[in-house]
Protein backbone atom coordinates (compact mmCIF):
# COMPACT_ATOMS: atom_id res chain seq x y z
CA UNK A 1 0.00 0.00 0.00
CA UNK A 2 2.85 2.38 0.76
CA UNK A 3 4.38 1.66 -2.66
CA UNK A 4 1.04 2.29 -4.34
CA UNK A 5 0.57 5.57 -2.48
CA UNK A 6 4.09 6.67 -3.35
CA UNK A 7 3.56 5.88 -7.03
CA UNK A 8 0.24 7.72 -7.07
CA UNK A 9 1.83 10.72 -5.40
CA UNK A 10 4.69 10.64 -7.90
CA UNK A 11 2.32 10.52 -10.87
CA UNK A 12 0.32 13.47 -9.55
CA UNK A 13 3.48 15.45 -8.85
CA UNK A 14 4.89 14.81 -12.32
CA UNK A 15 1.59 15.84 -13.88
CA UNK A 16 1.43 19.08 -11.92
CA UNK A 17 5.04 19.98 -12.61
CA UNK A 18 5.17 19.21 -16.33
CA UNK A 19 1.71 19.20 -17.93
CA UNK A 20 1.88 22.96 -18.51
CA UNK A 21 5.14 24.60 -19.51
CA UNK A 22 6.26 28.10 -20.39
CA UNK A 23 5.94 27.06 -24.02
CA UNK A 24 2.21 26.48 -23.49
CA UNK A 25 1.79 30.01 -22.20
CA UNK A 26 3.73 31.33 -25.17
CA UNK A 27 1.37 29.39 -27.46
CA UNK A 28 -1.59 30.91 -25.60
CA UNK A 29 -0.19 34.38 -26.24
CA UNK A 30 0.49 33.59 -29.90
CA UNK A 31 -3.14 32.49 -30.30
CA UNK A 32 -4.25 36.06 -29.62
CA UNK A 33 -5.22 35.36 -26.01
CA UNK A 34 -4.16 37.70 -23.25
CA UNK A 35 -4.98 36.08 -19.93
CA UNK A 36 -5.21 32.78 -18.09
CA UNK A 37 -7.48 31.59 -15.30
CA UNK A 38 -5.83 29.25 -12.82
CA UNK A 39 -8.18 27.02 -10.78
CA UNK A 40 -6.71 26.04 -7.42
CA UNK A 41 -7.92 23.77 -4.63
CA UNK A 42 -7.59 25.09 -1.09
CA UNK A 43 -5.28 22.19 -0.25
CA UNK A 44 -2.56 23.79 -2.35
CA UNK A 45 -2.33 26.44 0.38
CA UNK A 46 -3.77 24.85 3.51
CA UNK A 47 -4.04 21.08 3.90
CA UNK A 48 -4.38 19.24 7.21
CA UNK A 49 -2.82 15.88 8.02
CA UNK A 50 -6.21 14.14 8.13
CA UNK A 51 -7.25 15.33 4.67
CA UNK A 52 -6.75 12.99 1.67
CA UNK A 53 -5.22 15.56 -0.66
CA UNK A 54 -1.87 15.87 -2.35
CA UNK A 55 -0.38 19.30 -1.72
CA UNK A 56 2.70 20.95 -3.19
CA UNK A 57 1.03 22.85 -6.04
CA UNK A 58 1.79 26.32 -4.68
CA UNK A 59 5.34 26.61 -6.11
CA UNK A 60 3.94 25.75 -9.55
CA UNK A 61 1.30 28.44 -9.16
CA UNK A 62 4.04 30.97 -8.44
CA UNK A 63 6.00 29.73 -11.44
CA UNK A 64 2.95 29.99 -13.70
CA UNK A 65 2.23 33.56 -12.59
CA UNK A 66 5.86 34.50 -13.20
CA UNK A 67 5.73 33.03 -16.70
CA UNK A 68 2.49 34.83 -17.41
CA UNK A 69 3.97 38.10 -16.19
CA UNK A 70 7.01 37.69 -18.43
CA UNK A 71 4.77 37.01 -21.44
CA UNK A 72 2.36 39.87 -20.75
CA UNK A 73 -0.52 37.58 -19.82
CA UNK A 74 -2.90 38.60 -17.08
CA UNK A 75 -3.99 36.07 -14.46
CA UNK A 76 -7.17 35.30 -12.55
CA UNK A 77 -6.64 32.90 -9.64
CA UNK A 78 -9.76 30.94 -8.79
CA UNK A 79 -10.52 29.16 -5.50
CA UNK A 80 -11.90 26.08 -7.22
CA UNK A 81 -12.31 23.85 -4.20
CA UNK A 82 -13.17 25.01 -0.67
CA UNK A 83 -13.10 23.08 2.63
CA UNK A 84 -16.27 21.01 3.01
CA UNK A 85 -17.07 21.52 -0.70
CA UNK A 86 -19.14 24.39 -2.02
CA UNK A 87 -21.01 22.22 -4.53
CA UNK A 88 -20.56 18.54 -3.67
CA UNK A 89 -19.02 17.83 -7.07
CA UNK A 90 -15.70 16.38 -8.14
CA UNK A 91 -14.42 19.77 -9.32
CA UNK A 92 -14.48 20.95 -5.69
CA UNK A 93 -12.34 18.04 -4.53
CA UNK A 94 -15.14 16.33 -2.59
CA UNK A 95 -18.20 14.51 -3.91
CA UNK A 96 -21.16 14.41 -1.56
CA UNK A 97 -23.09 16.81 0.65
CA UNK A 98 -22.30 20.52 0.56
CA UNK A 99 -20.64 21.18 3.92
CA UNK A 100 -18.85 24.43 3.12
CA UNK A 101 -21.03 26.51 5.46
CA UNK A 102 -21.61 23.76 8.04
CA UNK A 103 -19.01 25.24 10.39
CA UNK A 104 -16.99 28.40 10.81
CA UNK A 105 -13.72 26.50 10.42
CA UNK A 106 -14.41 25.87 6.73
CA UNK A 107 -15.22 29.53 6.17
CA UNK A 108 -12.21 30.76 8.13
CA UNK A 109 -9.86 28.43 6.27
CA UNK A 110 -11.22 29.64 2.93
CA UNK A 111 -10.69 33.26 3.94
CA UNK A 112 -7.17 32.36 5.01
CA UNK A 113 -6.43 30.93 1.57
CA UNK A 114 -7.75 34.10 -0.10
CA UNK A 115 -5.68 36.22 2.27
CA UNK A 116 -2.49 34.30 1.50
CA UNK A 117 -3.06 34.35 -2.26
CA UNK A 118 -3.71 38.09 -2.26
CA UNK A 119 -0.73 38.90 -0.07
CA UNK A 120 1.57 36.90 -2.33
CA UNK A 121 0.36 37.97 -5.75
CA UNK A 122 -0.10 41.66 -5.09
CA UNK A 123 3.65 41.95 -4.54
CA UNK A 124 5.56 44.01 -7.09
CA UNK A 125 7.86 41.09 -7.90
CA UNK A 126 5.15 39.86 -10.28
CA UNK A 127 5.14 43.08 -12.29
CA UNK A 128 6.46 43.08 -15.81
CA UNK A 129 6.79 45.94 -18.25
CA UNK A 130 5.37 45.48 -21.73
CA UNK A 131 5.99 48.15 -24.35
CA UNK A 132 3.24 49.05 -26.78
CA UNK A 133 0.62 46.59 -25.60
CA UNK A 134 -2.58 47.43 -23.77
CA UNK A 135 -4.71 44.79 -22.08
CA UNK A 136 -8.27 45.75 -21.19
CA UNK A 137 -8.84 45.61 -17.43
CA UNK A 138 -5.61 43.66 -17.09
CA UNK A 139 -3.10 46.21 -15.91
CA UNK A 140 -2.33 49.80 -15.10
CA UNK A 141 -0.86 52.11 -17.72
CA UNK A 142 2.02 54.30 -16.60
CA UNK A 143 3.74 56.56 -19.17
CA UNK A 144 3.01 54.24 -22.08
CA UNK A 145 4.27 51.14 -20.30
CA UNK A 146 1.89 48.45 -19.06
CA UNK A 147 2.43 47.00 -15.62
CA UNK A 148 0.92 43.51 -15.71
CA UNK A 149 -0.19 41.82 -12.51
CA UNK A 150 -2.64 39.28 -11.15
CA UNK A 151 -5.92 40.71 -12.39
CA UNK A 152 -8.34 39.01 -10.05
CA UNK A 153 -8.93 36.64 -7.17
CA UNK A 154 -12.09 34.59 -7.65
CA UNK A 155 -13.57 33.99 -4.21
CA UNK A 156 -15.36 30.70 -4.92
CA UNK A 157 -16.03 28.57 -7.99
CA UNK A 158 -19.52 27.32 -8.86
CA UNK A 159 -21.26 27.40 -5.47
CA UNK A 160 -24.42 25.28 -5.52
CA UNK A 161 -27.12 26.81 -3.37
CA UNK A 162 -29.99 24.91 -1.77
CA UNK A 163 -32.81 25.63 0.63
CA UNK A 164 -30.98 24.00 3.51
CA UNK A 165 -27.45 24.65 4.64
CA UNK A 166 -26.22 26.88 1.82
CA UNK A 167 -28.45 29.79 0.84
CA UNK A 168 -27.94 33.02 -1.07
CA UNK A 169 -27.75 34.81 2.27
CA UNK A 170 -24.87 32.53 3.27
CA UNK A 171 -23.12 33.04 -0.06
CA UNK A 172 -23.38 36.81 0.00
CA UNK A 173 -22.10 36.87 3.57
CA UNK A 174 -19.05 34.90 2.43
CA UNK A 175 -18.61 37.16 -0.58
CA UNK A 176 -18.61 40.19 1.73
CA UNK A 177 -16.04 38.62 4.05
CA UNK A 178 -13.97 37.42 1.10
CA UNK A 179 -13.97 40.80 -0.63
CA UNK A 180 -12.87 42.56 2.55
CA UNK A 181 -10.18 39.93 3.06
CA UNK A 182 -8.77 40.53 -0.43
CA UNK A 183 -8.97 44.30 -0.03
CA UNK A 184 -7.29 44.27 3.37
CA UNK A 185 -4.55 41.89 2.29
CA UNK A 186 -3.71 43.99 -0.76
CA UNK A 187 -3.88 47.25 1.22
CA UNK A 188 -1.39 45.82 3.71
CA UNK A 189 0.96 45.19 0.80
CA UNK A 190 3.27 48.07 -0.10
CA UNK A 191 2.32 47.75 -3.78
CA UNK A 192 -1.33 48.74 -3.44
CA UNK A 193 -1.51 49.71 -7.13
CA UNK A 194 -1.29 46.01 -7.87
CA UNK A 195 -4.34 45.08 -5.79
CA UNK A 196 -6.29 42.36 -7.62
CA UNK A 197 -9.96 42.77 -8.42
CA UNK A 198 -12.52 40.63 -6.66
CA UNK A 199 -14.35 38.11 -8.84
CA UNK A 200 -17.49 36.32 -7.70
CA UNK A 201 -19.34 33.46 -9.36
CA UNK A 202 -22.99 34.08 -10.19
CA UNK A 203 -23.98 30.77 -8.53
CA UNK A 204 -25.88 29.94 -11.75
CA UNK A 205 -28.45 32.64 -10.98
CA UNK A 206 -27.31 34.61 -14.04
CA UNK A 207 -25.41 37.91 -14.27
CA UNK A 208 -28.66 39.90 -14.23
CA UNK A 209 -29.35 38.79 -10.64
CA UNK A 210 -26.25 40.68 -9.51
CA UNK A 211 -27.26 44.00 -11.02
CA UNK A 212 -25.94 46.90 -8.89
CA UNK A 213 -24.43 44.43 -6.43
CA UNK A 214 -21.17 44.91 -4.60
CA UNK A 215 -20.02 42.51 -1.88
CA UNK A 216 -18.93 45.23 0.53
CA UNK A 217 -22.09 47.29 0.00
CA UNK A 218 -24.92 46.05 -2.20
CA UNK A 219 -26.75 49.37 -2.32
CA UNK A 220 -27.66 50.33 -5.88
CA UNK A 221 -25.85 53.62 -5.55
CA UNK A 222 -22.50 51.96 -4.96
CA UNK A 223 -19.94 51.64 -7.73
CA UNK A 224 -19.10 48.17 -9.01
CA UNK A 225 -15.49 49.12 -9.73
CA UNK A 226 -13.05 46.44 -8.63
CA UNK A 227 -15.68 43.71 -8.94
CA UNK A 228 -16.34 41.24 -11.72
CA UNK A 229 -18.89 38.48 -12.14
CA UNK A 230 -18.00 35.02 -13.43
CA UNK A 231 -20.77 33.18 -15.28
CA UNK A 232 -20.34 29.73 -16.82
CA UNK A 233 -22.12 28.89 -20.06
CA UNK A 234 -22.23 25.16 -20.72
CA UNK A 235 -24.50 23.29 -23.11
CA UNK A 236 -23.31 19.87 -21.95
CA UNK A 237 -25.09 19.93 -18.59
CA UNK A 238 -28.65 20.38 -17.35
CA UNK A 239 -30.75 22.38 -17.88
CA UNK A 240 -29.27 23.25 -21.30
CA UNK A 241 -28.02 19.83 -22.40
CA UNK A 242 -31.06 18.93 -24.50
CA UNK A 243 -31.16 22.00 -26.72
CA UNK A 244 -31.02 21.72 -30.50
CA UNK A 245 -28.24 23.46 -32.40
CA UNK A 246 -30.58 26.32 -33.30
CA UNK A 247 -31.69 26.71 -29.68
CA UNK A 248 -28.07 26.76 -28.51
CA UNK A 249 -27.22 29.55 -30.93
CA UNK A 250 -30.28 31.53 -29.83
CA UNK A 251 -29.27 31.12 -26.18
CA UNK A 252 -25.73 32.30 -26.93
CA UNK A 253 -27.05 35.36 -28.73
CA UNK A 254 -29.36 36.16 -25.80
CA UNK A 255 -26.40 36.13 -23.41
CA UNK A 256 -24.50 38.34 -25.83
CA UNK A 257 -27.27 40.91 -25.90
CA UNK A 258 -27.57 40.86 -22.11
CA UNK A 259 -23.87 41.48 -21.55
CA UNK A 260 -23.58 44.07 -24.31
CA UNK A 261 -26.29 46.36 -22.92
CA UNK A 262 -24.60 49.71 -22.17
CA UNK A 263 -24.74 50.93 -18.56
CA UNK A 264 -26.99 48.06 -17.49
CA UNK A 265 -25.88 48.03 -13.87
CA UNK A 266 -24.61 44.47 -14.23
CA UNK A 267 -21.04 44.40 -12.91
CA UNK A 268 -18.21 43.62 -15.31
CA UNK A 269 -18.88 40.05 -16.38
CA UNK A 270 -16.65 37.39 -17.84
CA UNK A 271 -17.79 34.03 -19.13
CA UNK A 272 -15.30 32.15 -17.01
CA UNK A 273 -15.94 28.72 -18.50
CA UNK A 274 -17.36 27.46 -21.77
CA UNK A 275 -16.63 24.64 -24.19
CA UNK A 276 -17.83 23.02 -27.40
CA UNK A 277 -19.43 20.04 -25.68
CA UNK A 278 -23.20 19.68 -26.03
CA UNK A 279 -25.75 17.02 -25.20
CA UNK A 280 -24.86 14.27 -22.75
CA UNK A 281 -22.32 15.10 -20.03
CA UNK A 282 -18.80 14.63 -21.39
CA UNK A 283 -16.83 11.48 -20.75
CA UNK A 284 -13.60 10.16 -22.23
CA UNK A 285 -15.69 8.70 -25.06
CA UNK A 286 -18.18 11.49 -25.72
CA UNK A 287 -15.92 13.22 -28.23
CA UNK A 288 -13.55 12.06 -30.92
CA UNK A 289 -9.90 11.85 -29.88
CA UNK A 290 -8.45 10.41 -33.09
CA UNK A 291 -9.03 13.28 -35.51
CA UNK A 292 -11.83 11.45 -37.33
CA UNK A 293 -14.44 14.19 -36.98
CA UNK A 294 -16.54 14.40 -40.10
CA UNK A 295 -16.87 17.60 -42.08
CA UNK A 296 -20.32 18.47 -40.75
CA UNK A 297 -19.17 18.07 -37.16
CA UNK A 298 -16.19 20.36 -37.74
CA UNK A 299 -18.41 22.90 -39.46
CA UNK A 300 -20.65 22.91 -36.38
CA UNK A 301 -17.65 23.27 -34.07
CA UNK A 302 -16.47 26.32 -36.01
CA UNK A 303 -19.89 27.97 -35.80
CA UNK A 304 -20.31 27.12 -32.12
CA UNK A 305 -16.83 28.37 -31.25
CA UNK A 306 -17.12 31.66 -33.10
CA UNK A 307 -20.67 32.27 -31.89
CA UNK A 308 -19.44 32.10 -28.30
CA UNK A 309 -16.19 33.99 -28.85
CA UNK A 310 -18.08 36.88 -30.42
CA UNK A 311 -20.95 36.74 -27.93
CA UNK A 312 -18.73 36.87 -24.87
CA UNK A 313 -16.45 39.64 -26.17
CA UNK A 314 -17.28 43.35 -25.69
CA UNK A 315 -17.80 45.40 -28.84
CA UNK A 316 -18.63 48.83 -27.43
CA UNK A 317 -18.27 51.16 -24.45
CA UNK A 318 -19.92 50.80 -21.03
CA UNK A 319 -20.82 47.14 -21.53
CA UNK A 320 -20.80 44.54 -18.77
CA UNK A 321 -18.95 42.06 -20.96
CA UNK A 322 -15.20 41.93 -20.40
CA UNK A 323 -14.27 38.63 -22.06
CA UNK A 324 -14.07 34.90 -21.61
CA UNK A 325 -12.11 31.81 -20.61
CA UNK A 326 -12.36 28.58 -22.61
CA UNK A 327 -12.13 25.38 -20.58
CA UNK A 328 -9.40 24.38 -21.27
CA UNK A 329 -6.25 25.18 -23.23
CA UNK A 330 -5.51 21.47 -23.55
CA UNK A 331 -6.54 18.13 -22.08
CA UNK A 332 -4.65 14.90 -21.59
CA UNK A 333 -5.88 13.48 -24.91
CA UNK A 334 -6.72 16.83 -26.54
CA UNK A 335 -10.44 16.00 -26.58
CA UNK A 336 -11.96 17.98 -29.41
CA UNK A 337 -14.70 19.78 -27.49
CA UNK A 338 -12.54 20.66 -24.47
CA UNK A 339 -9.14 21.49 -25.99
CA UNK A 340 -8.59 24.98 -27.38
CA UNK A 341 -5.22 23.82 -28.71
CA UNK A 342 -6.87 20.98 -30.65
CA UNK A 343 -9.38 23.42 -32.09
CA UNK A 344 -6.56 25.60 -33.35
CA UNK A 345 -4.66 22.75 -34.98
CA UNK A 346 -7.73 21.14 -36.56
CA UNK A 347 -9.27 24.37 -37.75
CA UNK A 348 -12.49 24.94 -35.81
CA UNK A 349 -11.09 27.74 -33.64
CA UNK A 350 -9.73 30.92 -35.29
CA UNK A 351 -5.94 31.07 -35.34
CA UNK A 352 -5.88 34.52 -33.71
CA UNK A 353 -8.71 35.31 -31.30
CA UNK A 354 -7.83 39.01 -31.38
CA UNK A 355 -7.94 39.28 -35.19
CA UNK A 356 -11.41 39.21 -36.72
CA UNK A 357 -10.00 38.49 -40.18
CA UNK A 358 -9.21 34.95 -38.97
CA UNK A 359 -12.88 34.29 -38.18
CA UNK A 360 -15.13 32.50 -40.67
CA UNK A 361 -18.52 33.96 -39.70
CA UNK A 362 -19.47 37.66 -39.94
CA UNK A 363 -20.70 39.51 -36.88
CA UNK A 364 -24.08 41.23 -37.01
CA UNK A 365 -24.85 44.66 -35.61
CA UNK A 366 -26.49 43.11 -32.53
CA UNK A 367 -23.16 41.55 -31.53
CA UNK A 368 -24.04 37.99 -32.56
CA UNK A 369 -22.60 35.99 -35.45
CA UNK A 370 -24.46 35.57 -38.71
CA UNK A 371 -25.47 31.92 -38.41
CA UNK A 372 -26.85 31.93 -41.96
CA UNK A 373 -23.42 32.59 -43.48
CA UNK A 374 -22.40 29.89 -45.94
CA UNK A 375 -19.37 28.18 -44.42
CA UNK A 376 -18.27 24.56 -44.69
CA UNK A 377 -15.23 23.12 -42.98
CA UNK A 378 -12.45 21.75 -45.21
CA UNK A 379 -12.58 18.08 -46.11
CA UNK A 380 -9.43 17.46 -44.08
CA UNK A 381 -9.09 18.70 -40.51
CA UNK A 382 -6.53 21.45 -40.18
CA UNK A 383 -6.44 22.46 -43.84
CA UNK A 384 -7.68 25.83 -45.00
CA UNK A 385 -8.50 26.92 -41.46
CA UNK A 386 -8.24 30.65 -42.11
CA UNK A 387 -11.07 33.13 -41.98
CA UNK A 388 -12.70 35.57 -44.37
CA UNK A 389 -11.27 38.82 -45.66
CA UNK A 390 -11.56 41.50 -43.00
CA UNK A 391 -14.35 44.05 -43.37
CA UNK A 392 -14.64 47.27 -41.45
CA UNK A 393 -17.85 46.50 -39.57
CA UNK A 394 -16.70 43.27 -37.96
CA UNK A 395 -13.86 44.78 -35.96
CA UNK A 396 -14.15 44.24 -32.21
CA UNK A 397 -13.16 46.87 -29.71
CA UNK A 398 -11.04 46.01 -26.70
CA UNK A 399 -11.03 42.27 -27.26
CA UNK A 400 -10.32 40.30 -24.12
CA UNK A 401 -9.78 36.64 -24.93
CA UNK A 402 -8.90 34.31 -22.11
CA UNK A 403 -7.87 30.69 -21.66
CA UNK A 404 -7.90 28.36 -18.68
CA UNK A 405 -4.70 26.95 -17.21
CA UNK A 406 -5.34 24.12 -14.76
CA UNK A 407 -3.34 23.46 -11.61
CA UNK A 408 -4.93 20.63 -9.67
Image (cartoon, helix red, strand yellow):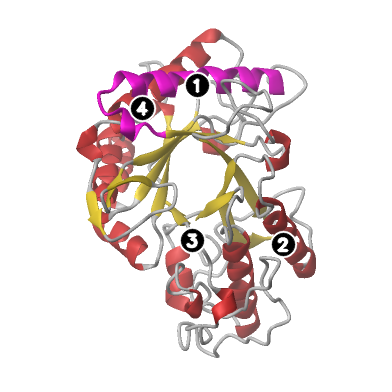
| Residue 97 x, y percent position in the rendering | 65, 24
**Residue visible at 43% across and 37% down in the picture:** 152
Image-quadrant location for residue 3:
top left
Q: Spatial distance from mark 4 to mark 3, Cα to Cα? A: 26 Å
Q: Which mark is residue 178?
A: 1
Is residue 108 among the parts visible in the rendering? yes
Sequence-earlier tag: 2 or 4: 4
**Residue 376 placement: quadrant:** bottom right
Q: Is residue 300 left or right of residue 16?
A: right
Mark seen at residue 399: 3
Q: Residue 162, how many percent across, how many down?
A: 74, 25
For the C terminus, the image quarter is top left
Residue matched to label 4: 118
Which marked residue is nearer to the observer: mark 1 or mark 3?
A: 3
First in sequence: mark 4 vs mark 1: 4
Q: Nearer the viewer, residue 6 or 258?
A: 258
Please give the range of residues in magenta: 168-196
On residue 14, the disc is none
From the image, give the main secondary structure of the stretch colored magenta.
Answer: helix
Question: In what element is the residue under mark 4?
Answer: helix
Does 290 sit left or right of 285 as displayed? left
| Point 55% across, 35% down: residue | 157
Kindly identify which residue carries mark 2. 253
Q: Tell me the crowding category of disc 2: few under 14, some 14 to 19, or many 20 or more residues within 10 angstroms, Cα based.
A: many
Measure the C-alpha gap from mark 4 to mark 1. Answer: 11 Å
Residue 302 higher or lower than 279, as above or below? below
| Label 1: which secondary element | helix
Amino acid sequence: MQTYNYRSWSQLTVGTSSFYTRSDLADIQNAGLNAIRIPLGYWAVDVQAYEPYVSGQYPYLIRAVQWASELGLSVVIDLHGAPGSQNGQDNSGLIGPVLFTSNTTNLDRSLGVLRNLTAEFSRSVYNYTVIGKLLLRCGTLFGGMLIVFVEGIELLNEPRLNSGNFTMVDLQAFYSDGARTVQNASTANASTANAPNVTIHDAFWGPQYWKNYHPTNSAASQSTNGLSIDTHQYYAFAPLNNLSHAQILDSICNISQLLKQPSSGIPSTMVGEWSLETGAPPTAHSSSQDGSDDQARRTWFRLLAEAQMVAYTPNGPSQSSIGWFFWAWKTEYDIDTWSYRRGLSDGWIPLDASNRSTYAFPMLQDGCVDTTYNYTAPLVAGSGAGGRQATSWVLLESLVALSTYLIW
